[in-house]
Image (cartoon, helix red, strand yellow):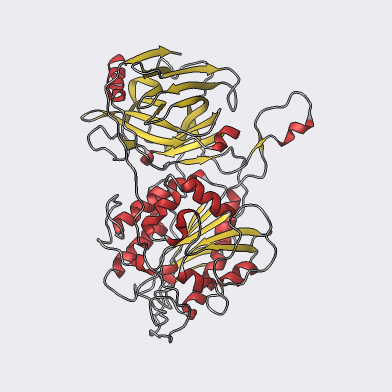
Amino acid sequence: MESMKKRVLSSLIIYTVIIAGTALIFYPAQASPLQQGSDSNPPERVVKLIFIHHSTGENWLSGGYGNLGQALADNNYYVSDTNYGWGPHGIGDRTDIPDWEEWFRSGSTPAYMEALFDEGDQHADYTRTGADPGGENEIVMFKSCFPNSDLEGSPNDPPSADGWLSVGHAKYVYNEILSYFGQHPEKLFVVITAPPLSDRSNAANARAFNLWLLNDWLAENDYPYQNVAVFDFYNVLTGNDGHHAFENGQEVHQIAKKDTLKYPSGDDHPSRKGSQKATDEFIPLLNYFYNRWQAEKPTSLAPISEDTSGDSSQADEYIPAAAAPELSSLIDSFDGVSPAGTNGWEAYWDEGTPSSLDCVIDPGAGSSGNALRLDYQIAPYSWGTCGMYYDQAQNWSGSAGLAFMIHTGQSGGVLHVDLFVEGTDGPESYLHELELTPRMEEEWVQVGIVWDYFQRVEWEEDAGTPFRKDDQISGLAFGFGTEEENLEGVLWLDDVGWMIPREDVGEEITTPAEPESEPDSQEGPEGFNLPCIGSLALPIGLVGAAYFQRTITKKRK
């Protein structure tokens, strides 16, 4: 164990800061899910929905064209939308596939999402009936426009951080933004695939990518919950024989025989007929997505702590209810007994600066008993960490990821979650950065991080590659690193454990036999003139790195 610790500490001597979004799944405390959700009945109450779109979406919403706005209203949804010119920094202008990283995985994401969840206005012309029920938008629909079906590359390209509109980069973007959706199981996110083009050049790529989104995206990421859904708008518009609907109690996806736009309107904006077809198939499917998502939400709230004073005024101190990861077993519940094969949790920090970090068992402070308390003060360009190391490397491949409860004394800053691995060519280190949110300050929050979200640290070979869950784990740590600012505070951790893989992730969607395709038909020019164009500017990612040599002090708990 001592030699392994020395290797771990030598890795900590080199510190890298990367300004990036959070890649995680986290969930508040959970009660048992309801046994429902296999129907397409409208919600029993009015549900607020926001649609991120441009001109194709505007046509789809509009009365006398796609009539989606009226159909949504008829099904108990109160619809608002974003369009060109909307939002902080004009983010509404940018809806290409690569732009979703700026929306859902950037330093501006909190501001964008606050505005999005609070938006209650119309930015397109469509029918909206009934009064605003109040509260935030619960459903977020988002769609890129038809230029995004002109994807370069090859149909089977793997995810790639490089590129712009390509199959590989599109997969990468959707993998990245999935992390934000996992942070908000109280919201339903509905991906509307980009509509097809008339041009056949990259049609096979578009088809392959959208099938990946529908069938493989969530499964490949071990995404365990039902707050993300995909509607294959693309497929519905590629032929009379192309369908994505809910029929006879099941989701039905039938691939059209052609990969190009079946319903043009004089250009590549879908026609009135195609848009109405999409509405007819989408509404029952959205109801199904909604019911399935609601079935996962609990019926009751769990108290933060027991009230022994008999004061009923404390009855409103509850954790918001939503789905949480199911655990196979705990690594450490902090009951005073160190996990087998370890010396328990130990603190390390950068002695060459005013930094300090202390980690101790805090009796009775946890979500269900004791907790691990971290008090930290990290100077600029410095670090501190609390780690646990095994005598013999562990195989955690039977689990989907790491889970734990967290509660902070303040919001702000980033918690580093580290995995130390006995690789075939020597020790390896993997990092996941977890943003400390206001919600964590208000209550205990359960965090689940699937294994793929741990990335090889920047200073090692193969930097940025994901952790392979069949690798041997030699240690686990929680800590902090800073670039230009001090970081100071306290947090508590409880019930560190393993997430159980969901067996039903990636279940096949029913695909009936294809009927004979109908002859192509075209409609005359119609609809709106607002162009559907690509974004004019790429989002800028800031990467900063600080490499330095320090000495370290070790302090046992």
Query: Relative to residue 306, is residue 468 drawn left or right?
Result: left
Q: State left or right for residue 511 relative to residue 138.
A: left
Residue 290 shows in this picture: yes
- Judge left or right: residue 444 versus residue 100: right
Q: Position of residue 488 (x, y in %)?
A: 48, 25
In this rendering, does residue 248 appear at all? Answer: no
Q: Which sits in the foreground, 249 or 111?
A: 111
Q: Is residue 476 rendered to the left or right of residue 551?
A: right
Q: Residue at x 37, y 39 (%)?
A: 19
Position of residue 66 measured from the top left corner of the image (x, y, whole percent): 53, 75
Between 181 and 231, the one nearer to me in the picture: 181
- Residue at 20% from the left image edge and 30% from the top image edge: 425
Question: Does residue 101 sit above or below 148 in this rendering?
Answer: above
The spot of residue 306 in percent (x, y) is: 69, 27
Q: Nearer the viewer, residue 183 or 52?
A: 52
The residue at the far left in this view is 425
**Residue 491 x/y as whole percent:** 52, 26
- Please determine whether, in this image, residue 57 is positioned above or below residue 407: below
Q: Which residue is drawn at 70% across and 63% down?
A: 131
* Quarter of the image with the N terminus in it: top left
Q: Is residue 15 above or below residue 449?
A: above
Placement of 304 over or under 240, stated as above or below: above
Q: How many labels does the image show?
A: 0
Q: Hey, which quadrant is residue 396 in on the image?
A: top left
| Picture quadrant of residue 397 | top left
